Structure formats: structure tokens, C-alpha cells
Amino acid sequence: MPTSPRLLVVDDEPDLCTLYELCLLREGYAVVCARDLAQARNLLAQQCFDVLITDMRLPDGLGLALLDELNQAQRAEKSIVITAYGSAENAVQSLKLGAFDYLTKPVDLKQLRATVAAALQSRPRQTACEPGQSALRTSRSQDAARGAAQSALERLVGSAPSVLQIKNRIIKVAASMAPVLIVGESGTGKELVARAVHACSHRASGALVAVNCGAIPEHLIEAEFFGVRKGAYTGATQDRNGYFQAAQGGSLLLDEIGDLPLPMQAKLLRVIQERRVRPLGSTQEEALDVRLISATHRDLAAMVQRGEFRQDLFYRLNVIELRTPALRERREDLPALARALLQRLCAESGQHAPELAAQALAWLAARELPGNVRELENLLQRALALSDGRTLDLADFDDAAPVSAGAASPASAPAHSDVGVPSDLQAYLDEQERQVLQKALQEADFNRTAAAARLGLNLRQMRYRIQRLGIVVPAQASSEDEHGV
């Protein structure tokens, strides 16, 4: 018969140690308690445990020392650290040392049970301290989870060193609860990386809720994130959960986290620290069991320096950083990416995936593709719409003029060849952006919401650019725009 999971609890307060022990014994676990580092080390030397639960501060040192020693010995115990309330630095440090998760005092017993169960679920079947232990038979659900994880990793197409590196890191970081920050240029596949982190984790059976922080109107952000209770405000006719509640037991992806307003950053920090959320209109807080994944194309460190992003929130989100490489950094993956994108696009429309002619592939390879994989996908999708054969030829890409003998390819010709090198690059780029925004506004009758949507921006981003570039918007149009006209 399978043995009960073995837990080691390290805490110097007898009452707390007894409380944790009783709570976990009721779940069917075998629990052993230690009062300090010395006793814990002695127990770890004698036997292997499934989970280590340790207080941060002990009479003879810090509980983090145990984590470091387990890592050095390559032991398989999952570690959970209990920190004092508001001790953000200790919590972040424990996650960086490999802790599965952390809890803050006073510990919520329901959350303790959930965290231990999650740690056990994420643990490998065979431990480093028991090499002779036979692996348990894999269930169908485990096979399905592994298949989903493999599928999510395969969607990260490519064999460039930067792609292989991020795949390896995903597998490593997926096993913990540590927050992940995914950084990279627009169109590099940050959401695909987030989905792979979720699919490879023990939370794969739970939901992955993806939220674009820049797409939510500022006055609705708190309600959308934390939920609303009936009667909280005019129009709140029923209880409604927010994104955090929807991601309970799973993962929450905060895409474009750099667009989150400063007041909401403070509220998000509190939720991360306390692992509890209070819906609007409620007097009760709800415990959270959510793995946080953030993504951005912006330089958050620079935003911190400019006072646009909270430093304490940045440190809490940036425990583990994953960087998605730009397409120009892995040009060798272009043929494989193009084939994979064509297959996916054709599968969605139910048509046969055509071959990509060598001349067309060479034309794509010669382009700068600043929009990365998303731009490549758009080019292929447009070519598919124009193509009527089993091969995508150069002529199907309507931007590609025929290349005659001895003539330079238009893709290789420098853009704006009639413009010399500007003496002030920022001023030149600002002017280009100003012209684009003015044209979009004029064509939308100065409706900023419509112009923003056409440019792939949200209204807040549009307002910021209009103000920064000094673009004049007619007062009547501005008023109409505010009322959604």
C-alpha cells in the first residue's frame, strides 16, 4: 500500500507547531516537527521527506539555510517558507532559493492545506534520496497533462539557442509557485510562453486566465480584477467574480503589466503579499490560490526609475524572468516558423497548407520584420488570401515587386532612402509618430477611441501619446469621445 506523504515542520513556537501538525494530520499526512535548524538537519540526515515547511526565523538561524542545503544536496523535498506579515524581501528571497511557495503569518490553515497539496502534486515521482523507489503507474490524467505540456512547448517553434534556453527554463520554473515575468518585444510570443509555463506546472488542470492590463478602462480595473458584490454601486445587480477568483487553483496572466495605473499597482501589491482579495462591496476577504505570470514589452526597470512603476511591485513580479527573443535574433528559425504558421492558419480555415516557394522565403528573410512573429503571421495570412495555388509564390505577397535580373530586391532597399541620417533621432521618430496619429485621428473624425483601436492601442495609451506629442484635438470631438460617441 502507498505510504502517507511525509512532512517536516520546523517552527520554534510549540503552539504553532502543534496547530500545523494537527491540521496536516487530519489530511492523512505523516508529520514530524523540529524546533530549530539543528534538529531539522538531524531529521533530514536520517530520512527523506516529501515537503519541508519552515519558519523564516529560528533560534539558531534562518530557515532559508535549509533550502540552500537541500539545493546543494540535490534533494527532492518541496519547501514552503512561513514569513512574517509584510516581509516582502524574505518572501522573494525564499522563492529565488527554490522554495515552492511561501505563506505569511498569521497562516490561514485552509491555505496551508492547499499549498501542501499543490507541493505534493508538483513533486517528481522518484526522489534523489530514494534512488531505489519504484515509480508509480502513471494515470490517464497524468498522461494527458504531460501531452498538454509537450504540446504547449512545441508551439514555441524553433531550434535556435535562445529558444531552447527558454524552453528549458520553462520546465524548471513551472514546478514552483514563484511569480514569473516574461519580457520581450511585441509579437515575440510572450503569451505562448505563459501558456507553456501553466501547462508544464501542477496547475495545468486549472484555468489560465489572461488579462490585458492596458485594455481595461481605468475606472473598471478594480472591479474586473477583484470582483463585485451585489449593491456595491449603481448597476451592480448581482455578485460577479473578478479575474483573481476566475483563476483560483490555476494561473493568472497579467499581460502588458506596464500599462497598469499606479493606484492599481498598490492594490495589486497588497493582494500578492497577503494572498487575499476583497471584492468591491464586500467586508470579507477571500483566500487566493493563484500563480501569477506577468508579461510586458516595456522596460519596467526604467519605468521604476522614472516613477511610473512601483519598485516593490517590480521586485515581487520579477522573481523569475523569462525573455522571449526577437525574430532578428533567431533568423535560422524563419523557415520552420513560416511552415508552422501556415499549417495553423490553414487548419483554422479548413484548407490545405501550401508550400512556401524559395523566392518567397528569401523575400521574407530579407525583410526586417520589426513586428516579429506576429508580423510574419500577418504577411502569410494575407498571402494565403491572395494565393490560388498549392504554392505561395513571391507574387502572392502583394508588397513584393517582381525582382528582375540585375535589379535590387525592394526588401533590401533602405526604407526612406531619400532621408539622411537625422541629427536628432528622437525628434525624428516623434515627428513620424505625430504624423501617423494625426492621420488616424483625422480619418476617425477625431474620435480617439476609434483611432486608438485602428492603431492597436487603448484609449489611455492614445491620450498619453496625444499629450506627449502636443497634438491638438478639437474640444467637441474630445467631449464626444469621452461619452463614447
Image: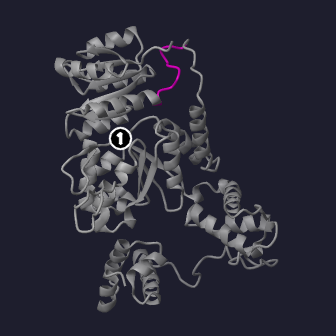
Residue 412 falls within the magenta-colored stretch: no
Query: Could you tell whether 390 is left or right of 226 in the image?
Result: right
- Point 21% across, 47% down: residue: 284
Tell which of 28 and 429 is nearer to you.
28
Residues in magenta? 122-131
Q: Quadrant of residue 137?
A: top right
The amino acid marked with disc number 1 is Asp
Query: Could you tell whether 329 is left or right of 244 in the image?
Result: right
Q: Is residue 359 visible?
A: yes
As drawn, 361 above or below 176: below
Query: Could you tell whether 364 is left or right of 104 in the image?
Result: right
Tell which of 430 and 190 is nearer to you.
190
- Point 47% across, 27% down: residue: 123
Q: Quadrant of residue 230?
A: bottom left
Residue 476 position, x and y percent, is 31, 91
Visual colour scheme: one colour
